[in-house]
Amino acid sequence: MKIDFLFTFRISRIHLTSRLKQTIVAALGVTFGIGTYIILMSFMTGLNGILDDLILNRTPHVHLFNETKQSQYQPIVLHKDFQYKINFVSSVKPSDAPIKIKNAIPMIQMLEQDDNVKAVTPQYTAKVFYLAGSTQLNGLIKGVDINKEVKHYNLNSYISQGDYRDLKPGTNTIILGKGIAKKLSLELYDKITVNAGNNNIALKIVGFYESGMSDVDNVQSYASIETAQRIGGVTNNYITDINIKLYKKELAPYMADRLEKQFSISAVDINEANAQFDTGTGIRNLISYAVSITLLIVAGFGIYNILNMFIYEKMDDIAILKATGFSGKDVQRIFILQAMLIGLVGGILGLILGYGVSYLISISPFETEAMPNLKTFPVNFNPMFYVGGMAFALVSTFFAGYLPARKAKNIDPVEIIRGK
């Protein structure tokens, strides 16, 4: 006889509810497997994302600068008598060329017209002394366009106090490194005197910069590029660094190589600048996915064992069904449907469990000096984790039910009834 889906569903439901404890145990196996997977992936990828943001968001895709280095070609090799000979030149000194980038303004204008370039941010770095009475601290003041730095490099996330909008061009203001402020006992809106070798300049503190790295916070501060150039006693076209943000990060090596040859300038792409960090990120992601997949596989075997025992305990029911006219395929469909129902219920509960625990983690207080603006644990609520978890719950329970159901399909009801 032909069995419709509703009748099959009704029989499956009756089987599941008749052995409610076993059904609950099977569903909980799915629930905890999927829930653990979601919790682990949400937390691990959230943590990796924060670490990536800490480094990569502050790193330009291409960094241009004028590096102090030895000339690759010495004058002696230009002479025709020595051009094809092996020449030994000792005590070669770097050139005395200034560290500024030549023709920086036209270069910036050209880069801004490039279709691959999202943003170009010039910088001037002034070496200074921070003065407080008889105390002198070595440091650096980075002159920047603060609005571009905030928009493209998320600088405001590292300003622990104050407002970056107060760092206006033409004003003697500074966002001071937190470590410097602690050493000199300075508060917000105090004034600090800096010296770049020419004269002393008093700057008003409008914010504190805190990267979480003491080597940086004890040295580095930010000012408008005009203020930094005035501190360094240089002209407005004196640029020491150009940072480039691209629409596609993958083009960074090509762009760096092209600009280095075109302008005879040093260029470092983001891959080269963060090679070690990228390796660490790849290993962390690999470990996260390996552990998550292992959890799902272990959960799948647990589901299989539970459903396998569940079906063997239903041998009498299988015999009765076949004796009343159900075919082997009908029996197989009934038990596969039971497994899928367990997977559906367990998967939904697993999603709820995973989301609930992930949410509790995301609101749990977490503060560290390495990431001053992080107040709670980082959690990534990526919908694909939930889609993947539910898909695995259904697929794993299907196969966990299919394999034992194939055996149930071929059971001879006469032998079971005779044995009873």
Image: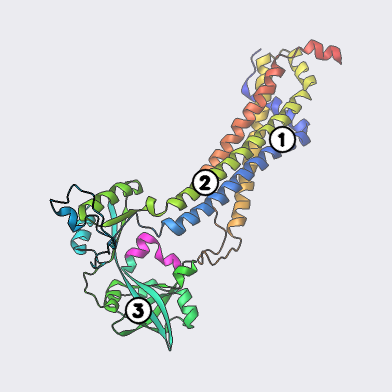
- Residue 236 position, x and y percent, is 22, 72
Q: Is residue 405 left or right of residue 254?
A: right
Sequence-wise, which precedes: disc 3 or disc 1?
1
Task: State how far apart marks 2 and 3 are (Cα).
Answer: 42 Å
- Residue 383 position, x and y percent, is 51, 45
- Which amino acid type is shown beneath numbered disc 2? Ile
Task: State the residue position of label 3.
Answer: 173
Task: State the residue position of label 2.
Answer: 283
Sequence-wise, which precedes: disc 2 or disc 3?
3
- Residue 10 position, x and y percent, is 69, 27
Residue bounds of the magenta highlight? 148-160
Task: State the residue position of label 1.
Answer: 26
Task: State how far apart marks 3 and 1 are (Cα).
Answer: 65 Å
Q: Secondary structure at mark 3?
A: strand
- The quarter of the rendered structure image containing the C terminus is top right
Q: Residue at x 21, y 69 (%)?
A: 237
> Who is closer to the viewer here, 343 or 110?
110
- The quarter of the rendered structure image containing the N terminus is top right
Q: Residue at x 58, y 57 (%)?
A: 362
Q: Is residue 113 left or right of residue 52?
A: left
Q: Is residue 265 left or right of residue 142?
A: left
Q: Are marks 2 and 3 in contact (CB under 8 Å)?
A: no
In the picture, the disc for residue 419 is none
Q: Quadrant of residue 177?
A: bottom left
Up/down of 258 relative to 132, above or below: above
Q: Residue at x 51, y 52 (%)?
A: 48
Q: Main secondary structure of the magenta part?
A: helix
Up/down of 385 relative to 79, above or below: above
- Which amino acid type is shown beneath numbered disc 1? Ala
